[in-house]
Image: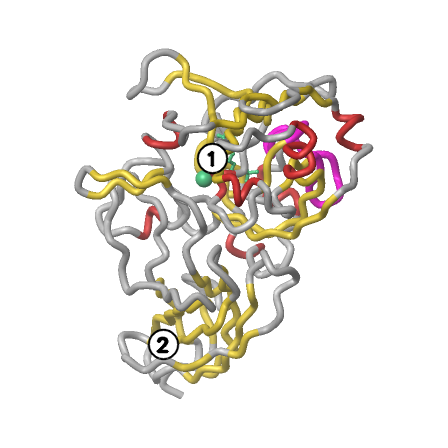
Amino acid sequence: MHDEAALDVVRADPLCAETPARLLTAPITPAASVYVRSNFALPPLDATHTIAIGGAVRSPFTMSMAELAALPQRHVTVTMECAGNGRLGMDTVPAGEPWRYGAVSTTTWSGVSLRTLLERAGLAPDVVEILGHGADAGPRDDADGDVRFARSLPIADAMHPDTIVATHMAGERLSVDHGAPMRLIVPGWYGMASVKWLARLEAITTPFTGYFQLQRYVYEVNGTVEPVRRTLVKSMITSPIDGGSCARAVLVHGWAWSGAGAIARVELAVNDAPVWIDAALGTPVSAYAWTPFEAELVLPDAATATIRSRATDTAGNAQPERIEWNRLGYGNNGIRGIAVVVTDEGR
Ligand SMILES: Nc1nc2c(c(=O)[nH]1)N[C@H]1C(S)=C(S)[C@@H](COP(=O)(O)O)O[C@H]1N2
Ligand SMILES: [Mo]
């Protein structure tokens, strides 16, 4: 179903797989290498699958793939990151999928604005959230019976025209792993909001309290629980590659992204020196895609070096030195250092 060489598999079944580091240099991730995160076995859906829109609406309806295809199509190019990306980089690694740094990808999704469907259904005035139900379910050791994947979105995010019910990725029909035949795509939010194998949309008048809203994909700190929402500001050096080698004079490349706004600044530092050098920012391929940065550095005359990057977004959020530890290991946007071997040391 998927090309093994194109992904670094973290868990085979259900498939959880990262984009390999060498492929993270591309502005648009090769389609076969877009990371995959699935909680349960793949649900048995086919092209005859219909989506049901209901709950607190005037006129509930169901829609087929053909009907969706006949509506105006919207294309959004999005950097999507799993909230667990970078979990292995946390001091005292929490339980959960052991993601390194490749649970992030950029691709173009196409489909229909969720808003178009909600307007057609006619939302009741007291609707607060739109709940997306996946068709996938399974047992969890901290819940009774089977749990279905479901996640809610505040009404303002659900009504944003770039929140879509996607049927295509990178110009092709969705693959099963990416949620065929239809899924939500919520730009600016961590991946868990983009419900795959979307079966039902439900307008609700009180905030959702389901398993994947309050027991998973939450920041749990000292017993307090806060659902994970927008993607935190982060940067990633893609060249030189972490663990690779380079000359002392090196052109450093990478990406920075944030769900809270555009990227305002990326700075680099070498080893533990508290000296931050501004990188030059390039233009992202879309407002929801990562921003390229580059800077020429001259590394110290030593066998190895660490290069760190720190991004700041236009809302003023900057990457922290270290995140506040949370039990499930989400949102690790702490400053990361990549280690390199210096090839012309001592010359
Ligand atoms: N129905 C359903 N939707 C889901 C998930 C899931 O397990 N089931 N995983 C979520 C998570 S945690 C992420 S990060 C994204 C990953 O989307 P992808 O596999 O297409 O990269 O899907 C989200 N949508
Ligand atoms: Mo995720």
Q: Is mark 1 within 8 Å of ligand 1?
A: no
Q: Which residue is mark 1?
A: 128
Question: Which residues make up the magenta segment?
Answer: 167-182
Q: Position of residue 55 (x, y in %)?
A: 54, 21
Secondary structure mainly formed by the magenta segment: loop
Instruction: Give the distance between the C-alpha atoms of the residues marked 1 and 2, in whole angstroms.
Output: 44 Å
Mark 1: secondary structure: loop
Rendered position, 75 above or below 172: below
Q: Residue at x 73, y 34 (%)?
A: 173
Residue type at mark 1: give it. Answer: Val
Per the image, the residue denoted by label 2 is 269
User: Percent x, y for residue 295?
Assistant: 50, 79
Quarter-of-image position of residue 303: bottom left
Residue at 76% from the left image edge and 42% from the top image edge: 73
- In percent of width and height, residue 340 lies at 40, 69
* Secondary element at image label 2: strand
User: Which is nearer the eye, 202 or 307?
Assistant: 202
- In the displayed orientation, state which residue is furthest to the top: 145
| Residue 119 disc label | none
Decide if residue 1 is in sight here: no
Q: Position of residue 155 (x, y in %)?
A: 52, 39
Q: Is residue 18 above or below residue 235?
A: above
Nearer the observer, 309 or 346? 309
Give the mark count.
Answer: 2
Q: Between residues 22 and 254, which one lies in front from this camera angle?
A: 254
Residue at 69% x, 19% y is 49
Amino acid type, label 2: Ala
Q: Is residue 174 magenta?
A: yes
Closer to the chain start, of discs 1 and 2, is 1
Density class for disc 1 (Cα within 10 Å; few <14, some 14-19, many ≥20) is many
